[in-house]
Image (spheres, rainbow, N blue to C red):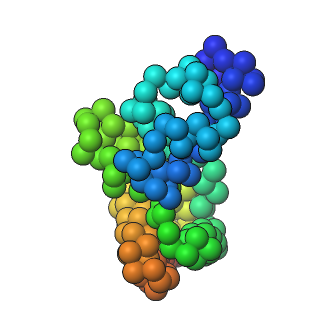
Amino acid sequence: MDDGLTAKGRATRARILAATAELVRRKGVTRTQLDDVRRAAGVSGSQLTHYFHDKRTLIDDVIAWQADVVADHEPALDSFAAWHRWADQIVARHTGRKFQGGCDFGSLAGQLVESSPQTRSYLADGYGRWLDRFRRDLGAMRDQGLLSGDADPDALAHSMLAAMQGGVLLAQTLRRVEPLRDSLDAALARLESYAR
């Protein structure tokens, strides 16, 4: 990556993005102020403005950063066992958070999707990358003969991601696990209906 930053500069920028993402998850975009970010990241105001022109730039970069985290850290989901582990990890993560904050990426989308066409396109790109990961792994399962030939990786990717996102939102709102577990179980059952 040739972004003109030193290794130390990249680390500082990443620390600011991570701190902002955590603040936004806990407090929301509107209640997260630049002074909060500065304190949480342990940087000066001049450092903050050096890396991010304003709050809008910072939030747009958090969206891109969260999309990278999703795209780069999603485990390979190319078996039924892997999909079950994925679902169990989601349930464990949100149970551990006591269902507060929602999905790191989804909560950004819920708050910002209508804020500007450019921001909506960043969010759509992030979801698109997530769906691509799912679609690729589901296609691999079909190619390996784990899924029947009539399994549609695109439709299955949509249903898996929608089940997770909707389940997380309901669990966050109701502060209980059942909506998340039930939505993921239903999506897994649909996936397994195509097992060969």
- Residue 120 image offset from top left, x and y in percent: 30, 41
Is residue 11 toward the left or the right of residue 171 in the image?
A: right
Is residue 96 toward the left or the right of residue 123 in the image?
A: right
Q: How many labels does the image show?
A: 0
- Residue 109 image offset from top left, x and y in percent: 36, 51
Decide: is 2 above or below 42: above
Q: Which quadrant of the view contains residue 157?
A: bottom left
Q: Which quadrant of the view contains residue 124?
A: top left
> Image point 52% across, 23% down: which residue?
49
Decide: is 4 above or below 1: above
> Image point 25% across, 35% down: which residue?
117
- Work out which quarter of the rendered image holds the N terminus and state it: top right
Decide: is 22 above or below 41: below
Residue reaching furthest right? 7
Judging depth in this view, the residue of 128 and 145 nearest the camera is 128
Is residue 72 visible in this depiction of the protein? no
- Residue 178 image offset from top left, x and y in percent: 46, 86
> Image point 46% across, 22% down: which residue?
53
Judging depth in this view, the residue of 45 and 186 nearest the camera is 45
- Residue 111 image offset from top left, x and y in percent: 33, 52
Is residue 86 visible in this depiction of the protein? yes
> Image point 64% across, 57% down: which residue?
75
